[in-house]
Amino acid sequence: MSSIIKGNKISVSVFGQSHSESIGAVIDGIPAGIEIDYDRINAFMARRAPGQSKFSTPRKEADKPEVLSGIVNSKTCGAPISIKIDNTNTRSQDYDNLKLLPRPSHSDYSAYVKFGGNNDIAGGGQFSGRLTAPLCYAGAVCSQILESKGITIKTHIFSIKDVKDEAFDLENLYDDELEFDPLFPVISRFKGERMKTVIQLAREAGDSVGGVVECAVLGMPAGIGEPMFDGIENVISKNIFGIPAIKGIEFGSGFSGTEKYGSENNDNFSVKDGKVVTVTNNHGGILGGITSGMPIVFRTAVKPTPSISIPQTSVNLKTMKEEELVIHGRHDPCIVPRAAAAIEAVTAITVLDLVL
Amino acid sequence: MSSIIKGNKISVSVFGQSHSESIGAVIDGIPAGIEIDYDRINAFMARRAPGQSKFSTPRKEADKPEVLSGIVNSKTCGAPISIKIDNTNTRSQDYDNLKLLPRPSHSDYSAYVKFGGNNDIAGGGQFSGRLTAPLCYAGAVCSQILESKGITIKTHIFSIKDVKDEAFDLENLYDDELEFDPLFPVISRFKGERMKTVIQLAREAGDSVGGVVECAVLGMPAGIGEPMFDGIENVISKNIFGIPAIKGIEFGSGFSGTEKYGSENNDNFSVKDGKVVTVTNNHGGILGGITSGMPIVFRTAVKPTPSISIPQTSVNLKTMKEEELVIHGRHDPCIVPRAAAAIEAVTAITVLDLVL
Amino acid sequence: MSSIIKGNKISVSVFGQSHSESIGAVIDGIPAGIEIDYDRINAFMARRAPGQSKFSTPRKEADKPEVLSGIVNSKTCGAPISIKIDNTNTRSQDYDNLKLLPRPSHSDYSAYVKFGGNNDIAGGGQFSGRLTAPLCYAGAVCSQILESKGITIKTHIFSIKDVKDEAFDLENLYDDELEFDPLFPVISRFKGERMKTVIQLAREAGDSVGGVVECAVLGMPAGIGEPMFDGIENVISKNIFGIPAIKGIEFGSGFSGTEKYGSENNDNFSVKDGKVVTVTNNHGGILGGITSGMPIVFRTAVKPTPSISIPQTSVNLKTMKEEELVIHGRHDPCIVPRAAAAIEAVTAITVLDLVL
Amino acid sequence: MSSIIKGNKISVSVFGQSHSESIGAVIDGIPAGIEIDYDRINAFMARRAPGQSKFSTPRKEADKPEVLSGIVNSKTCGAPISIKIDNTNTRSQDYDNLKLLPRPSHSDYSAYVKFGGNNDIAGGGQFSGRLTAPLCYAGAVCSQILESKGITIKTHIFSIKDVKDEAFDLENLYDDELEFDPLFPVISRFKGERMKTVIQLAREAGDSVGGVVECAVLGMPAGIGEPMFDGIENVISKNIFGIPAIKGIEFGSGFSGTEKYGSENNDNFSVKDGKVVTVTNNHGGILGGITSGMPIVFRTAVKPTPSISIPQTSVNLKTMKEEELVIHGRHDPCIVPRAAAAIEAVTAITVLDLVL
């Protein structure tokens, strides 16, 4: 069992392969009586959709989600919300040569072993990034409910390859002016342009780049979460690693915090507007697995897209001999901007489950 | 619900506070008929025990685990194994001034809010690193079973503050000569000495340091794990964040992999001894959530111990005024060496559940 | 969260309301490489389909399941299998007067409170027996796999109102001749005719009747299951109560066993074909939550269909005054024959999860 | 994994074998700040304790529960509550002849197969009814919290063998005068005396009897529970079957309701004190898996104690030959009165999880 985000209240069951009839999700546990704003859902999904700019794959997905159940007259009725998105514009022949020749750093080989060669290889099958589309639908629904509770999530591209955006700081986080370009969300436009150049150069070289996405959850009340194994870090990380290509996650000062002294990394307490706050937020809003009332801040590492045009070495699983592999087809030189939407979606699902 | 590692087969339910009558664990799902090697358990627990060297807290814990059930004549009988460790040598008065004055970057404040001030503050209560002792017991039992299946876990201190050990590489990983000092496991003794100096200086300054622990799981067969939300990264990260002070985790090349091109980060396939392998292991043994047969490699960020002697600023939760806080008592200037044992223990529990 | 059968390996996530666009299911955890026999699935679903005989509702459902994912060229690929069945032939106006006038012994009132009046009342919404159609699909898939492992499930109508079929006995259970009429499965045709008469009389009176379904799982190896809370009885009962109208379950001699002496109810051991067996099977194949190798036998109570034409008393939820309620529309005077298929389906899902 | 009641908020992890060092439980998720009334806990546990009357086993258990964690100065602190009860007064030699000669209708044989002969046979091992002692502790804690929320559970012996007590009716349920003898709770004292006679006769004959326990949960608000697989019936039945010797459960009119017409079994609505009620309660307080606001009523079948002195036939697992088995030792001719306490305890745990 694999394709389910299972919270205490909310679960999201994702289905589909890249080239199956449809992909979709069953979203269980959304409270009844919520008015669904389809424009917002479409806007959220557009952030993940490919083919919108030269910084992503030219493959254009129609991605028209259809509601199958759970919403009556634009309002949730308490029954699981199920949606499907039909797969169109698939070119399965692109993948024919991959059946026995696993692509490096894709799931082809591990899936081949697990499923005894029966896995659906076309378009990456169930491992395709396409599966994040229904996740974004679910996340968009959850975001809407969170905002009605005063909780918002802000997400930006923290880095592309070695080009770093400015980090969130405690001031700009709450800045309502901080509106990101939905298709390429960065704090510093200057850095954003440099990132785009890096992506463009990778594309031209038939190569790819990765990056880091930073996410902040604002408005979380203190005292949410559990000690030890059901803490905030535990559930966020478990769910975030469900997104393809994620290889790392850190909260607050994270790995860089390990290079500080305790006296530098500790966050002194203070009072602001009659509320206990911390002066810095190296703890990323989480202490002992429980929210402190400060923004939850975390960063996730998105590896460079494994699909590249440059020839690579694979092993033919039949002959057990090395072969050169050239991947044809349409590839995304950098999925970080689109992954940012998926990360925000999964965060919204996870956080809503925590506060319900 | 919080203190349970819940796998498909194995669950570990941890209980106790730092100063309660006892701490302990209930380990459910261990196969029947396993001969328990108590010497190995004691050796494992010694790696986590404090007071053994000048690099950790002088507080000496007796830490004698007593088996309450589940083992008959040194053999598991299929019933849950339960153990307890009595708390002795506790000095609760050390913590009296903390009740209303939360220590920076400890769980005091978030726990105060969550539990309405009823939480047990003494010694860190249920958030104490002491709770990792029963985890190490459980991990030692699981390690034993894993080794009988040809799976071993190697753990070393990857860095203390800004001093980095050598990283595992594909050659030294399988080197049987690679035997670590159990109390201070490093690959490079030279770097180890420098790390100890850094810790010693922090102690003298009343300060603390953190670091990174690297873990490798050898002998994992390919094809274990699930796509999406029950993948290897998902379950390891969920459980590892249950250890106090962990703020980040990365698999394979992790965050540094995001600074590479796809062509650099991708792991080409090759054949070795008739088996499919990868030439490099930037994927950390996991592709699409499923093992590739290569070693699982991950690093976790351990923050600097928040307990320091240097005066800090807190807020009195009654008066809501800032106050200077000086933490008395015995502190550990660096918990990384002991955390390494806990990380290995949780990894063993998690991996055993995956392969059973 | 509610609509998920969550096993260790297999989960089935059901979605839809009686009058939503579609109903369906996501079946996760089915092994890869299984050849799907669609004829068998259709035959299984026909057992649950309404409108086939005068003993059930005249409402004819098209019930054409469409596979959305998880099956490639008639073979499972390891990805979740998702199916949908479009809702057609719905007459929502039949339910308009029910919005504020809850039908006795339906879920209308409890759902109204839970969902704040936002629940989809049309056709029973998500509580409709129609939701058992996708369950039957999932059950048919699981049955197929079980049979390849030598495990079969036999289900018959044990009673309709006070007319009782013969019970399974240890001899007839293994009788391959024992082939049931799929639409009205009974051991004794004579009793079956009397049952049909009882149903016909209830229909003519605008009333309804219930009954008991008996299920036997043959071929279960001994030693499957867990002590205490994850035992066979625990998981079967948890899942079976997910079928609408089920109000009781008993294993082996069940309630009638409580009227016996221990010496009568105990099952002595014997040897047959070199295998340990019991002479009688009052324990229903389960001892201490674990299979004994004898057939699992259980009976479930299906209450009389709450939809009847006879006038009843309800309370107008707006005026809070009693009102007479007359339910129009097409009703099933007895759902027991169709429930039998759903019970067998849920049993197949549950048992497959146990043996995988 | 087996010995855990796992709710959304509360989990209870039970450990121990009949003759291990200790038995106990870890109770996770109890809110912080609850004042524990130890007298009430002791009173609850006394209801389950053996050796108190001639209607149960003469084996006297000390059953002194010791709190290991989770309670500070008689108040819950939010950490898991753990308790242990040391096993004393064990006579393991009584069980020596059972190792290879499984007792009919005990778990000996199924456990032997599951655990490969390594299971702890002494006193029934982990399958012993003794394990319900820590459950009663947990239940007593939960009961206390439930009562502070206006929810109470009433439990009586519905039948012993074929002697039936009066059933709960809607009037006597709320009768505060209805106080049961804790050691032998019945509504009709006259019927109670007849039950005791039946038990006494069984004891004299070296035989045993079973019975049915009826439980009512009063004060449940409407709208609690979930449709389908997480409904009230689902979770109560899953947990109740964790108690040894339970073989059936029915809600409301249950099995007898299947012999009624729909028009008889349906519960008309009415208004009482401005609240929607039903005139009858054949639905047992649950409609569509969700509470209706009426009392939850269910009955559970407790099989006759399998331990009897009368010679029985077993199979020697080494020689695979039938042998006569005579069980020596101290036996309980009827565990129903003590099971009633365990049933109420598990109900309290389950219901508290639902309303938290």
Image: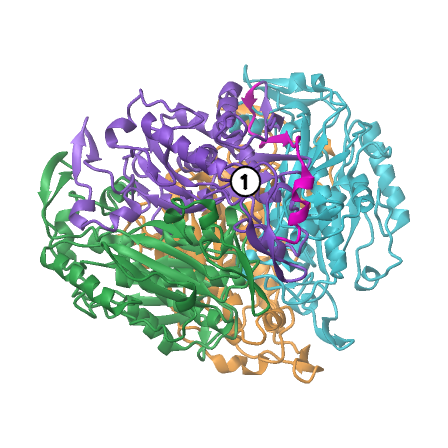
Chain colours: A purple, B green, C cyan, D orange
Q: Can residue A312 be seen in this view?
A: yes
Is residue A77 rendered magenta in the image?
yes
Three-letter code for the amino acid on which mark 1 is drawn? Ile
Local SS, label 1: strand
* Residue D287: percent from left, percent from top: 60, 34
Residue drawn at the location 77% of the way across and 28% of the way down:
C331
For this rendering, which residue is in front, A281 or B250?
Answer: B250
State the extent of the magenta-drawn residues as a range: A74-101
Graded by Cα atoms within 10 Å as few (under 14), some (14 to 19) or many (20 or more), the crowding at tag 1 reads: many
- Which residue is label 1 attached to? D296
Between B348 and B31, which is closer to the camera in this rendering?
B348
Residue A188 lies in magenta, yes or no? no
* Chain letter of disc 1 in the image: D
Q: Does residue A279 sit above or below D105 in this rendering?
A: above
D243 sits left or right of A90 in the view: left
Q: Is residue C182 above or below residue D102?
A: above
In the rendered structure, the answer to whether residue D221 lies left or right of residue B129 reads right
